[in-house]
Amino acid sequence: MGKKGKKGSETPCAETFEPLPFEGKTPATIVLLLRSPEEDILAKACEAIHIFAEKGDENQVSLLGLGALEPLCQLITHTNQLVRRNASMALGIMANNDVVRIALKKIDVIPSIIDKLSPEEDIVVHEFATLCLASLSVDFVCKAQIFDNKGLPPLIRLLSSPDPDVMKNSLETIFNLVQDHHSRMAVHELGGIPPLLDLLKSDFPVIQQVALKTLQNVTIDQESCHTLREKQGFEKLMDILSNTEFKDLHAEALRVVVNCMNDSESLQVIHKSGGLMRLMEFVVTPNMPEIQSNAVKCIARVAQSSENRKLLHEQNVEKVLVELLSVGDVSVNTAACKAVFAMSSHLASKDSFRDLGGIPEVVRLLSNDSLVLREAATQALSKLTHSNQLNAFAVYEAEGHEILVQQLYGSCPSTVANSAATLGNMAGQEVIRCSVLSHGAIRALVEPLKSRDTQVLVNATLCLAVLACDKEARAELLRAGGLHPLVNLLHTNQKEVFHNVCLAINACSSDVPAAVEMCKFGALERLQQINQSATHRSSFSRLAMMSLLNSNLSVKYSLTGHLAPTDIISDGFYDTGKAPAGQSILTLKELSEQPVNEQRPVIVVNTAKAEALEVREVRHSNQSEADTSSKAGSRITRKKKEDDKRKEENQNETPQRKPWKMMEDVSLQVLLKEAKESIIPLSDEREQCAALARLVSEAMGGAVEMEKLHEVPWLLHLSELKFLLQSNVVPIGLINRGIYCHRALLFKCLADRIGMSCTLVRGEYNRAWNEVLLFNGNPSRKEHSSKACRYIVDLMHQPGSLLKASTPAALQYQTL
């Protein structure tokens, strides 16, 4: 204290106070002292806070509420070493608390903490600064701040600190950081792998554990694996795996080995050091599921290369894996299935798994409750059965196909994809395919066709393409509504999916109802677009389109204007004329339901006899035009009256709408009967063609001179028929005044029914013709001495004449 002077004449005192000892009674008092200008008081206040904070989370939260955090963050950069150390200790302890950690995120303290990691700093500061970073680095934002503020280099350097706590805290911080790719790469580039490997020799198990976990993350990148191999990392890992005292480290060490087994060079290093045999020992070690599963994962990783698979096969790894399939542990079973999948790329291994009874074991695992295990089991089966009919049959004998069909309804895309692949592999054998279909495989595949997962779509469409070679499968797909999602997939951008969809459409097109349904959903329009694109068309798209057209000849003729000799016209064929590009073609039912219009009529072929009608009229070719027209009108009028009568009766019976039916064509029935009776008995093909041509010409109004062609009233005749029928659809047998396009269609229709071979080709301006292939010379020796020639059959001007193709006469017939 200072001296007392006289009243009113006090002077400043040059002496100072002696340091006063203090004793804080409350945390609030201590926190207030953190703002003291006295270094001694600051050091003691920080120490007191450290001691108070160590007693638990409640105290740490209390200190936060009293405002201790901000001054502590400032004091870690104080010029006084003791203040810095004590402040760092207090901050490090408080940072362990979740609530404090959230508050610290709002304070830009990480650069200051990283600055305390310099070599010149006290080792105690290192300990608590790294402790603080270890706590903060669990947060994503803080990890980014540590990385951006170049915290990794000093942390890697401190892995070699003489203080185990500093090593542990630095290691834990690095472990948290390397969860992110850019930090993993940085650890490798900053030379972090050698000090991490050195920590494997630490006397502290916790440091060894965290070092292995960190290496496991770092070695996800292949460059780090190479560095680990160059720094004798495999040898150090093998030392741990060979030491029974380190059993608690074996699982983590194996995980690092798994990452590094992607290339044959790594395998050779491990194999030469006896590591492969050690792995096999771990695999068969009982009552150690975690160790076993990690060892099997190593084997699966090793088996990624063909050279390694061969080496493992020589070690009889298949026998060990089959034994593991029956172990009562899901993790071991899952790892074993994945190893089976990897090894099954080796042909000899595929056979070994079957011979050792492995396939029934994998099938058994399909019923496990674990989704992960079922996924691995289906994956193994997909590879086992690929291009291996004996394995496919083994799955069938184990009744695996029944379970696989049910797996198609699963929620895991990978399991669905694998199941579809396996079923597709198996369905190549008829007996298996029939059984697969009997268990509802087609209905089960409908939903996968709507998936957004590419692999599901690839496998489901390929499986469907194989199953759809069965007639009943195609019918079931139609009933199940699977054709619509199949056609929708023609819009996919995935090349493999598109190819498989085309194969499935090709298979389904074998049935006319399925082909018509797919056309209804726009399959033809889409395939046309694709086939017109130089970049998107392929042999697959062309195959799908031709298959659709071949099963829908009406559409084929409308789009292409050509029917081959193998395209046999059947009942229900209709000619709408040439379809404009990009326009969809309506079905016959849809065309029949349209109101009568001024467009050209739709010509339909129907030789079927209606059960309800008993019309038996004989058509005479020598009738006059008026007689013919009146008789045709008479038949139409009579049929209309009968239809009206039935309609009235039906209205009295039931209000239910009857299914649409084609109009009966009695005249065509008569023509067909006449053709069969008069033409089939003829032995010479030329005579048959000529006779059929004359029959068609007489039915369509007889021969017409070229100069008088314009006088044929065929347009008026067809308009009258449309009016009488009150329909745009006209049966071809009712046409008595037809020209080229009508006669060529009738010729093709009758020729197909009596077994004659001919084409139907549409030209311009209502022209159409038939080409026949005939042999010159002696028909009985045609295969040896005759040459086949193409002829155009004249149906208009000199009916029965055969015009050799490409001659002036033939070209004149084909054009105006």
Image (cartoon, rainbow, N blue to C red):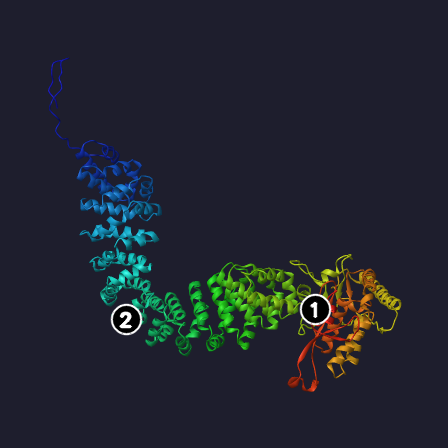
> Quarter-wise, where is residue 55 in the image?
top left
Against 361, is 188 above or below?
A: above
Which comes before the other along the chain, label 1 or label 2? 2
Note whether residue 661 is visible: no
Q: Is residue 578 left or right of residue 15?
A: right
Residue 755 image point, x, y percent: 71, 78
Residue 754 image point, x, y percent: 73, 78
Instruction: Determine the residue positioned at 25% across, 47% down.
Output: 131
Q: Is residue 416 left or right of residue 687?
A: left
Q: Is residue 426 left or right of residue 301?
A: right
> According to the image, label 2 marks what residue?
271
Disc tally is: 2
Q: Is the residue under label 2 in contact with that under label 1 (CB below 8 Å)?
A: no
Mark 1 residue type: Val
Residue 735 image point, x, y percent: 81, 67
Residue neighbourhood size for the residue with mark 2, other residues' Cα within 10 Å, grouped as few (<14), some (14–19), many (≥20): some
Q: CA distance from mark 1 to mark 2?
A: 72 Å
Residue 475 image point, x, y percent: 62, 69
> According to the image, label 1 marks what residue?
761
